[in-house]
Image (spheres, rainbow, N blue to C red):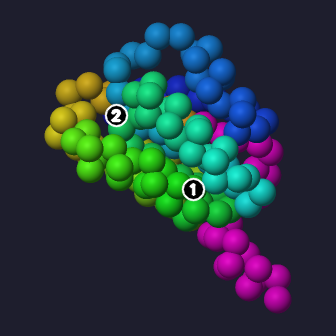
Amino acid sequence: MTMVRRVSVRALGDVVPAVDALGPAPTPRFVAMLAVDARDAADAKIEAVVRALIDRGACAFACAGPDRARVEEVADGVAIPLEEAGAPAILTSSHKNVAAAVQFAGWVIVSDEYKASCGWVLEVRIGDLGDVADVANDGERAAKRS
């Protein structure tokens, strides 16, 4: 996958309108790279964004930023029941920094059912990540401060 479309927004609630404003997608399916500091975000807000992106064609998620493991878990909580109901698998992953997530998103192998229709990456940066986009995890960050 070589085409990347980028969206930068201030808050989780701004993601869906910004994605919709991109206009027609190059292909029906895409890999979503979510870079977000989710430490203060409720699971329900993250879940709403994940559901909206799946509804718009996301077939894989690469997560980065503090609390990225929780963002991946929330994405799994949406994706796994869909798969159990017969939908193709939606891969989720978390990465130590934005660069690793972007690289993964560009090379991920999606489910066979999505291969023909998945041809681009949606890079979503939420909030002012500053230096937190490159921290490995909340626990590791806290340990380094001690």
Magenta span contains residue 142: yes
Q: Is residue 36 left or right of residue 83?
A: right
> Where residue 111 sits: x, y (%)?
23, 43
The quadrant where residue 2 appears: top left
View extreme (top): residue:
24
Residue 121 at x, y = what percent?
44, 33
Q: In which quadrant is the C terminus drawn?
A: bottom right
Magenta stretch?
124-146
Q: Is residue 37 visible?
A: no
> How many numbered marks are there?
2
Camera-nearest label, 2 or 1? 1
Determine the secondary structure under disc 1: helix
Q: Is residue 80 visible?
A: yes
- Residue 32, compared with residue 16, is above or below; it is below
Q: Which residue is mark 2?
A: 1
The reply to whether the magenta stretch includes residue 92 is: no
In this view of the protein, which residue sits in the foreground, 7 or 19?
19
Give above or below for 58 relative to 25.
below
Q: Write the residue at 59% across / 38% down.
A: 49
Q: Earlier in the sequence, mark 2 or mark 1?
A: 2
Please indicate whether residue 100 sits to the left or right of residue 125 in the image. Answer: left
Left-right relation of 45 to 62 = right
Residue 83: mark in rendering: none
Residue found at x 34% / y 21%: 28
**In the image, what residue type sits under mark 2?**
Met
* Residue sitting at x 50%, y 37%: 51
Inter-mark Cα distance, 2 to 1:
23 Å
Under circle 2, the secondary element is loop
Mark 1, residues whose alpha carbon is within 10 Å: few (<14), some, or many (≥20)? many
Q: Toward the viewer: 59 or 137? A: 59
Query: What is the quadrant of residue 27 in the picture?
Result: top left
Residue where numbered disc 1 is placed: 71
